[in-house]
Amino acid sequence: MSEAANIKHWQTMSFRDADAMIAWLSAIGFTEHATYRDEADASVVVHAEWLWAGGGGVMFGSQRDDGVVRNVGGSAAYLVVDDPDAVFDKAVAAGATVIRETVDQDYGGRGGSVEDPEGNHWSFGSYQPQ
């Protein structure tokens, strides 16, 4: 990855089924840094931080009335990856819906897009915006 790929960017999201999305995030290459659950209901994720190997990550929690992020299924993220085809294939195998197949882009790099099981848009590409 280029030095510019080390820019730390954190996407914030809210999920209806945080455990299902934890499985999906793991399948595409995110790793857990921290996951805090509600003491009264362990199925509720109050706050989680999952890391992306290229830098940054995603912070998320379960959808709840006192949550800050309320647009469940309305988020979008672009992940810079060395092999967008591999990450794209992992995302689809883990339950994502293809939005745009992975192709070479006119502006450089290669990329494609999917919708995760909760309706969030994810793009995976080798193009690093400058």
Image (tube, rainbow, N blue to C red):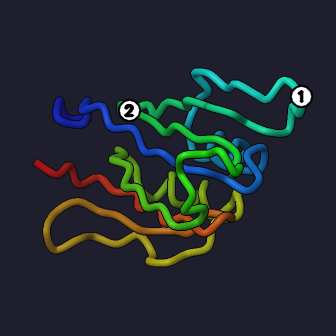
Residue occupying the point 29% across, 52% down: 126
Mark linked to residue 52? none
Horizontal relation, residue 52 to residue 97: left or right: left
| Residue toward you, 1 or 7 | 7
Q: The disc labelled 2 sits on which kind of residue?
A: Gly
User: Horizontal and vertical percent for residue 6?
Assistant: 26, 30
> Which residue sits furthest front?
66
Residue 88 in the image: x percent, y percent? Answer: 51, 60
Residue situated in front as seen by the camera: 9 or 125: 9
What kind of element bears circle 2? loop
Is 9 above or below relative to 73?
above
Q: Is residue 73 above or below residue 31?
A: below
> Of label 2 and label 1, which has the lower sequence position?
1
As drawn, the residue found furthest toward the left would be 130
In percent of width and height, residue 70 lies at 57, 57
In the figure, 17 relative to 52: above or below? below
Marks 2 and 1 sit apart, C-alpha to C-alpha, by 30 Å
Residue 102 in which image quadrant: bottom left
Residue at numbered disc 2: 56
The amino acid type of the residue labelled 1 equals: Ala
Q: Residues within 10 Å of mark 2 (few under 14, many from 20)?
A: some
Instruction: Please tell me whether residue 24 is drawn above or below residue 115 in the rendered image.
Output: above
Residue 12 shown left or right of residue 1 in the figure = right
The structure residue drawn at horizontal position 61% and vertical position 26%, both measured from the top left corner, is 32
- Residue 4 in percent (x, y) is at 17, 35
Residue at the image position 35 percent from the left and 44 percent from the top: 82
Looking at the image, which residue is at 51% across and 67% down?
74
Judge left or right: residue 108 versus residue 79: left
Q: Which mark is residue 40?
A: 1
Category of crowding for the residue at label 1, using alpha-carbon neighbours closer than 10 angstroms: few (below 14), some (14–19), many (at least 20): few
